[in-house]
Amino acid sequence: MKFDRIFECDVLVIGAGVSGCCAAIQAGRCGCRTILLEKDEVLGGNSGPNLGVEVRGAQHYNDYAQETGIIQELEEEEAFACAVTPVRGMKYNISRRREAVYADFLKQAGVTVLKSHCARAPRLENGRITAVEAVDTACYRTVEIRIAHAVIDASGDGSVAAAAGAEFETAVEPRSRYGERSAPENAHAMIQGASMTAIACRTGHPVPFVPPEGTPPYHPRTWEDRLSFYYTEVRQGAKSFDGSGQFTAEAPEGTLRFLYFTEAGGDRDTIADGGAIYEQLLGQVWSFWNHVKNGPGREAAANWDLLWVSPRAGKRQSRRFTGDHVLTQNDIEAGRFFDDDIAYGGHNLDDHRTYGEDCSIFTHSIPPAYGIPFRCCYSRNVENLLFGGRLISASHIAHSSVRVMRTGGAIGQAVGLAAALCRRHGCSPREVYRKHLEELKLELQRRDGSPTPRRVSDPADLAPSATVRADCERRFNDQQPEIAVPMFEAAGAVLYYWPERIERVRLHLSNPSAQAVGCTLRFARFAPERRWLFRHEFNRFGRNTPDAAQFRELAAAEFTVPPGFHGWREVTLPAALRPGAKRRLDDSDRLLVTLRSAAVALRWHMVRDKSESAAAVEFDPHRNCWIPFDAQPALQLFPPPAYGEAVNVTNGFNRRWGTGPVDQWIAPFRGEPLHLEFRWDGPRTVGKAILFFDDLERTPDDNPWRCGRRFSPRLVRDYSIEVYEHGSWRPAVTVSDNRRRWRHHAFPAVKTDRVRLTVEAVHEGGTEVRVCQVNLYPGEIL
């Protein structure tokens, strides 16, 4: 066949959704000749300007668990560029400026982007894809793309992968296949459907709506197979379907609201019947808007107009390709980690079921964070084929969690890096797993990817061999007791991090009475029967349930407080307590320290500047719960747990994993420069630095791109990297107005026995310096 144009590349990425873009950017940054093929005219896939679905991930159900790496960089830049659609309620986004952020990153990485190019026929030689035929639908030209090393199919449907003979599943597996508790007894073809979005606008005048001919009757959606209040509000015309606010005249003129209320196609072939499914969804849009404008709430909705309807449907599921491991509901709900994890997930198992015109959204569970192994991300029978996004190897039920786009972005970055290793070593993805897995994980860590928590030892990094010191640092036991709280009920502290061994504790107590007071100190660890939650359990407390029955007692100690006592009371445990290591990336894993006394006179003091690793709790006997409040009791542990010491920047972890920010240097910033110094016992050659700052927030709504800020106040703003030469310090790198978590700097290599990071300023609103990790290398690494 004669082609109008021929391209050559090392890595071909098919599909420019979040996962595909992250894969292409990473492969390009690694020096691969990379082509990104996209059949649409815009980037972003379901998150792009033709649909605008928010980029969700593990953080929606697990505090501080946002995936990092390239997806974090993209969203940091979106916030700074104000690349958002100013809507209320749901954080959907159709900003073309946001798409331009993706385009800029791809260009900077040297990626060739071919929009409006529909990939179709692959050419195989000896089980490898060596070329792919595509059609440029903008001008009806045919092109051939010749591939030297790897193909990453992140297209959502995987048509090229399927045409290449890659094994895949589409049906829902029976329970007997993987032993999943939520799987049906028998296999069936009812998969997740597709949806559309729309935007409504509040105008300054009445706007009539005349429904198109053939508009179907209104069918409300259900939640967990019930007509919940969330979905029935709109039947009275009172609120928008996403529950974000009222369709009333009181809304300011120009108010925009995203609407998300359609569901169809799960009972059809979501690929072959895509056009018909879109028309069915469009009919649902007209039906819903007709109900709003001409139904029971028409007076309240009189001035609202349907401003925009998405020109594409948002598909959730089609093919699931088979790798060397199939991720299952059992893996996810157990919070299982694997040796070859290259990303993690943690979103709820969100199953959208369609039944003709009716539908229901069903949550199987809220899981803890779980690992996504590399073996799920390449084909088991096509040698050089990798997968991104929702195409990875997973059961139907596991797919309902792993399919979300921020998780897909983390997977995309990892497979982009794996493709680069295929080029570097002249090998297949399976050989990367078998022979170069540690290299893949190390390179991913250096690039701020999202593997599951593991202490990384980087043989090229000079920082761990240095003595690290700072001008000041925050330590857990540096506590200033202040307000005294009477012990009417049992009280305590929840610890989000703790030392591996606890020998003794100190509590700051007051006993103004004339009698000695007897006390009992108990230690318990959160140990639920199952680590996943039903939705109603999560809605009540989140993952951090305070139910006393969920804590397992580890140790107890009796002691007395003398009459008239005021100060630190030391309690030595009968035997050293070994509570077990904290599970990073599991914020529900907590240690509970409680104090009980029969005397009301006893008082426990709260500290002035509370840490993030501990929170005060009081016991509610009516609900058998430990209820947290915004304070920290004066409780010191010995040996002390890590908190904000300078040495943490070399402990092998480059981010915080939960409420306890223990894997970083934390220091109060009062306007004067602060120094973090690395000193060796002799000269070292240093020419490269990688810095990891902290801008990870507790919940999605705390992130700048969702709450209207342009950057996180946690970030260091102005800093320099200085080297010690000829008896004085000189700057090797100077940075102003930093707005990134991950920074890498190359500079002319120098022999020195000292390097320091000097922080000149933090962003407005910030009161502390936070640095998670510093890597120092002799020369270029990335």
Image (tube, rainbow, N blue to C red):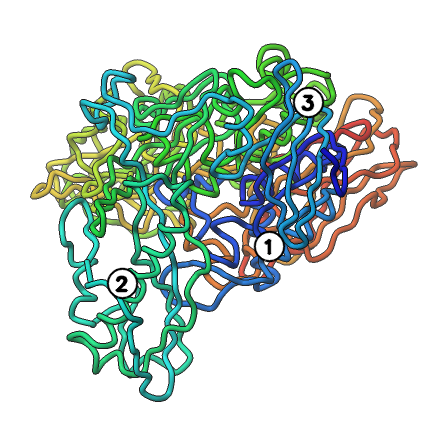
What kind of element bears circle 1? loop
Q: Position of 514 compared to 580: left or right?
A: left
Q: From mark 1 to mark 3, how far is it between C-alphas? A: 30 Å
Pick the residue in front: 190 or 533.
190
Instruction: Farthest residue to the left: give it.
Output: 622
**Mark 2 = which residue?**
241
Q: Amino acid at mark 1?
A: Glu
Q: Which quadrant would the C terminus be assigned to in this image? A: top right
- Which amino acid is tagged 3? Leu
Residue 121, above or below 729: above
Q: As drawn, is 4 to the left or to the right of 388?
A: right
Residue behind mark 1 = 41
Q: Which residue is mark 3?
A: 421
Q: Nearer the viewer, mark 1 or mark 3?
A: 1
Q: CA distance from mark 2 to mark 3?
A: 47 Å
Answer with mark 2 or mark 3, whichever residue precedes in sequence: 2
Residue 584 visible, this angle: yes
* Other residues around mark 3 within 10 Å, as few (<14) / some (14–19) / many (≥20): many
The mark lying in front, picked from 2 and 1, is 1
Which residue type does callout 2 highlight?
Phe
The crowd level at tag 2 (other Cα within 10 Å; few <14, some 14-19, many 20+) is many
Give the CA distance from mark 2 to mark 1. 29 Å
Label 1 environment density (alpha carbons within 10 Å; few <14, some 14–19, many ≥20): few
Residue found at x 38% / y 41%: 270
